[in-house]
Amino acid sequence: MARVLVIGSAHLDVIGEYQDIRYVDRKGKVTYSIGGTAYNIAVDLAQHRVRCFLFTYLKKNSILSRIIWNKLALRGVKRRYVRSVTTICGDAADPLPLAESGFVAHRDSGLRCDRTCLGRAVIGGRRRGSGPCSAIRHNPIQPAGVGSVGGSLYRRSAAPSLIVVHSLVHAIAALEAAAELGRPVTILSAPNAGIYGGPGWFKALIDAARTAVPTADAVFMLHCGDDAGAAQSALRAGIETVIFTGRADVAERLASIAYAKGGRLLTTRPEASFDLGRWFFADAETLRRHCAARLA
């Protein structure tokens, strides 16, 4: 009997469906299933009685990994080459953590808007562009992490990484590394930086960093905590993504400002494990090298 090895991702698909678009918190239905291109191909081959092996990475000690592991056996896919690990890539001194996430999408009145999200199921959100997503432009509030990281159980090469910066030197180093590698990057401010540093400072940092590295594909996010004044100032200053964690009714009003300005409002701070504060006083080359290792 022929044997086939399929290499690629296996992850949890999460689909949220809702009808009422009047509220940020919406009643709906969430369904889960195992997916991933490689998983689907392997299962299809196994159902046709092909001796099929799947090579993929699953996060160690994860309930999602256990679900996928059991489902592979149920579908007749051989698990000899499924690796259970906690880190992937990077060097021994600074390994990169293996992400745990699923493919997340939502349906607004039957229209599907595909998203990727770090390890959480989200109903709601908005995306610019044509097609089905344009039908839900009314809501500029987006859950944290949406559209910023890959949706498989291991990091995809094309997915932007989150890097927390504390200064202009940090931001330039991150953009230089991203430009050299041709990778997208998301620059996230320190917690509450919009309060103690101010939107003006962060906007100046954005402008200076983009002037220094104009070829970098980067998105900047400013965290303003629960300070509505700081969040409003940031939106009016033209900062593209602002994080506000205060009251929902205030977030709705800020969302209207974000929509008018063509920006985004997040109501939860994205999880970011790579913080350049670890090398706060390092020279520019050291910072660039660490960022390149993260983005590679």
Image (cartoon, rainbow, N blue to C red):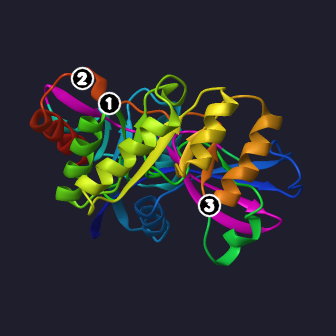
Q: Which residues are magenta?
A: 92-121
Which amino acid is tagged 3? Gly
Q: Residue furthest bottom?
A: 131
Asked which secondary structure carries label 2, the reply is loop
- The location of residue 84, given as percent across then percent down, is 33, 35
Earlier in the chain: of badge 3 and badge 1, it is 1
Drawn side of residue 89 relative to residue 102, left or right: left
Whether 104 is among the magenta residues is: yes
Earlier in the chain: of badge 2 and badge 1, it is 1
Q: Main secondary structure of the magenta part?
A: strand
Residue at numbered disc 3: 262
Which of the labelled discs sits on residue 86, or is there none? Answer: 1
Label 2, label 1: how many angstroms apart (C-alpha)?
26 Å
Which amino acid is tagged 2? Phe
Mark 3 neighbour class, 10 Å CA radius: few under 14, some 14 to 19, many 20 or more: some
Which amino acid is tagged 1? Thr
- The location of residue 74, given as percent across then percent down, is 53, 49
The quadrant of the picture occupied by the N terminus is bottom left
- Look at the image and tell me whether residue 195 can be seen: yes
